[in-house]
Amino acid sequence: MSLIESLPARPLEPQELTSLNRADAFELVVAVEDDGPARSLLVATEGWVKAIAYEDDAGWSVVETVELDDETERIDGLQACEEAVLSFRGDENEE
């Protein structure tokens, strides 16, 4: 089952993010939004970071994937993915 297929067909509640962070499959799962249900996620493993966004009419989709290696550290991947998801959302979450 893919990452997208494992997510419910709706934004995630905070307790669901906590559960994902406890899962062995991921090292880090964070919401891009500061409050309310998570419609944008940054998901990291040892080898990659993905930006994932939820849209009411299309469900979850991967917006960006950054492969981690000797030249690309996790923080760089997280920043690139956050920028990608904010751009995808039209910067609606930035003040």
Image: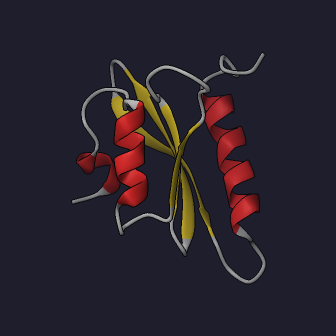
Q: Residue furthest bottom?
A: 70
- Report the number of discs: 0
Q: For this rendering, which residue is in front, 86 or 74?
A: 74
When the figure is inspected, residue 64 is found, relative to residue 83, above or below; the finding is below
Q: Where is residue 89, by image quadrant? A: top right
Q: For this rendering, which residue is in front, 31 or 89?
A: 31
Residue 72 x %, y % = 74, 72
When the figure is inspected, residue 84 is found, relative to residue 78, above or below; the finding is above
Q: Where is residue 2, by image quadrant? A: bottom left
- Report the side of 85 relative to 19 (left or right): right
Q: Residue furthest left?
A: 1
Residue 88 x %, y % = 61, 30
Residue 52 x %, y % = 48, 42
**How is the structure coloured here?**
secondary structure
Residue at 74% across, 50% down: 79
When the figure is inspected, residue 66 is found, relative to residue 32, above or below; the finding is below
Residue at 24% across, 48% down: 5
Q: Where is residue 9, by image quadrant? A: top left
The quadrant of the picture occupied by the C terminus is top right
Residue at 68% across, 30% down: 87
Residue 33 x %, y % = 59, 28
Residue at 65% across, 48% down: 81
The quadrant of the picture occupied by the N terminus is bottom left
- Report the side of 71 relative to 93 (left or right): right
Q: For this rendering, which residue is in front, 67 or 26?
A: 26
